[in-house]
Image (cartoon, helix red, strand yellow):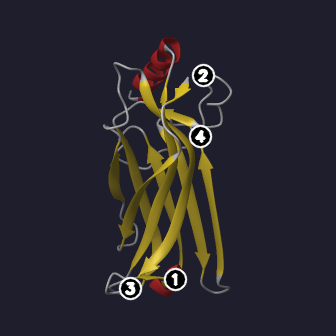
Amino acid sequence: MAAKTSVFYLTERLTMSTSGTDVTDTIDLGAYVDVADRQGILVHAVDFVWEGSDSSGDCQSLTLSLGGSGSGIIQVTDLNRGALAFADDRALVASGQILYGSTDNNLSNNADLYPDNFGPTSAQGGRIVINDQMYVRGVWTGSISANEAVECTVRIKASVITLSQKDFMAIALQSTAADN
C-alpha cells in the first residue's frame, strides 16, 4: 500500500427535525476511488459533532434545540443498507451515539471505527473503502423544540491509497459478500 495523498477531511451534515425519522445522505468518493489503479480511501478516524439549530437555521448548543431527554444514532457505511446497520455488518465503517438526560442535564457521547486488517501495519487501525460512495444515516429519538433541529456533522479523516492487487481483491470480495 502506498499513500497517494496526505490526510484530508470529508464532511457531511445531517439535519434531524422530526423525532424517530431516519435521515440519510451520501459522500461521493468517485474522484478518489479508481478501480483500474487499485486506488481507495483509507479512513483514519471519524468524528461526530452534535449541535442544534434554531428556527432560523443558525447553529446553537444542542441542549437549546431539545425539548427533553433523547438519544441520537449516526452511522457511516460503504453500502446503502436502507436502515440502521447492526455492529456486525461488514458495511459499517463507523458509528456514534449520543444520550441526553434533561432531568440532570447529563450528556454522553461515544463513537466507534471498524478497522480492516488488510495491507501493511500502517493501514491497520483504519478502514479501507473502495466503493464510490459512503452513506450516512442518523436518527434522533426524543423531543425536539418546535421549528428547531438536531444537527450531526460527520468529519472523516482520510487519505487516498494504492493497494496491492491481493489487498484490493480481498476488499472487493468482502464488499461483495457484505452486499448480500
The mark closer to the camera, 2 or 1, is 2
According to the picture, the residue beneath numbered tag 3 turns out to be 54
Mark 3: secondary structure: loop
Label 4, label 1: how many angstroms apart (C-alpha)? Answer: 29 Å
Q: Residues within 10 Å of mark 4 (few under 14, many from 20)?
A: some
The mark closer to the camera, 3 or 2, is 2
Label 2, label 1: how many angstroms apart (C-alpha)? Answer: 41 Å
Mark 1: secondary structure: loop
Pointer 4 or 2: first along the chain: 4
Q: Which mark is residue 61?
A: 1
Pointer 1 or 3: first along the chain: 3
Q: Which mark is residue 118?
A: none
Q: Residue at x 38, y 29 (%)?
A: 179
Label 4, label 2: how many angstroms apart (C-alpha)? Answer: 15 Å
Instruction: Indicate the amino acid at tag 3.
Output: Asp
Marks 1 and 3 close (CB-CB < 8 Å): no
Pointer 4 or 1: first along the chain: 1
What is the number of callouts on the image?
Answer: 4
**From what the image shows, is residue 36 above or below residue 23?**
above
Mark 2: secondary structure: loop
Q: Which mark is residue 119?
A: 2
